[in-house]
Image (spheres, rainbow, N blue to C red):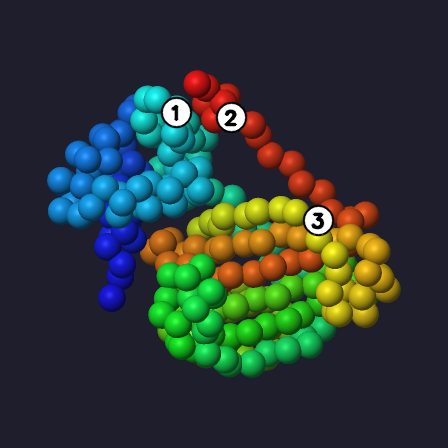
Amino acid sequence: MIPKYMQVYTEIKDTIQKGSYSANEMLPSGEEFAKQYACSVLTVKKALDRLVSEGVIVRKRGLGSFVKKCRTGPDRMQGVPVIGRDLIREEVTSVVERFEVVTCTAELADKMNIQAGEFVYEIERIRLYKQEPRVVEYTWMPLQIIPGLQRRDVETSIYAYIEKQLHRHIQGAHLSFQAVRPQALEKKYFHMNDNDFVCQVEELAYLDTSEIFEYSIARHLPQYFHFETNVIKELYDN
């Protein structure tokens, strides 16, 4: 069963993408949305929090929530595009250290909006560029959403399997970044010790149905890690 806040999130997002609200237009208040969708204000807040994290709306202190300007078409999710991360390229290969089906912990279930105890793929793989290890990835995917994944898909491109075999559309992701100490796999493949740092990217990836199909932690060699973004003035308006 889809949680109520996800239903509200999907409804509001669809309304925005269909152009019912213009860029920079203020959305109804939480109380108004709560009446409209017959739910609590807390449920509305949770739905709006997700839209904020995806870059669909922005909150202005003391005013409310506003639709953000978007340079892409209305059918594109206004988050970070992720499909390019896992395309098949001859110079990019993978070493799969772990590929198993396990039951989901409560912590993972909360992140992926599924029930604790559901089956998920647990994947650990090293991404190499021209045979040089560059990224260590720890990935979890619900079987219910991504059925039939095989080790050969993990060794090549999971995203290609999702798009070409399952005919599901990957639309965007929420990312967070930080520097962390290396774990065993990073020490092994990056030749690091406890005093070193790696650049970590934590990701929740979404299909166009708004389902979370992947939670991953990617740890990059610092010398090859590059990140850039655009700063939007509305985020800092009082």
Q: Which mark is residue 1?
A: none
Dot 3 or dot 1, earlier in sequence: 1
Q: Choose between 73 and 41: the one closer to the eye.
A: 41
Residue 182 appears in the figure: yes
Q: Secondary structure at mark 3?
A: strand
Q: Quadrant of residue 88?
A: bottom right
Circles 1, 2 touching at the beta carbon (< 8 Å): no
Q: Position of residue 234 (x, y in %)?
A: 45, 23
Instruction: State the mark number for residue 60.
Output: 1
Whichever of labels 3 and 2 marks the residue nearer the N terminus, that label is 3
Q: Residue at x 37, y 42 (%)?
A: 49
The residue singled out by tag 3 in the image is 179
Residue 54 x/y as whole percent: 44, 42
Q: Amino acid at mark 3?
A: Ala
Of residues 45 and 102, the one nearer the viewer is: 45
Residue 172 vs residue 231, the one in the foreground: 231
The picture places residue 63, in percent across and down from the top left corner, at 32, 22
At mark 2, the secondary structure is loop
Mark 3 and mark 2: Cα distance apart in space: 24 Å
Query: Alpha carbon of mark 3 to alpha carbon of mark 1: how far?
Result: 29 Å
The residue to which callout 2 is attached is: 232
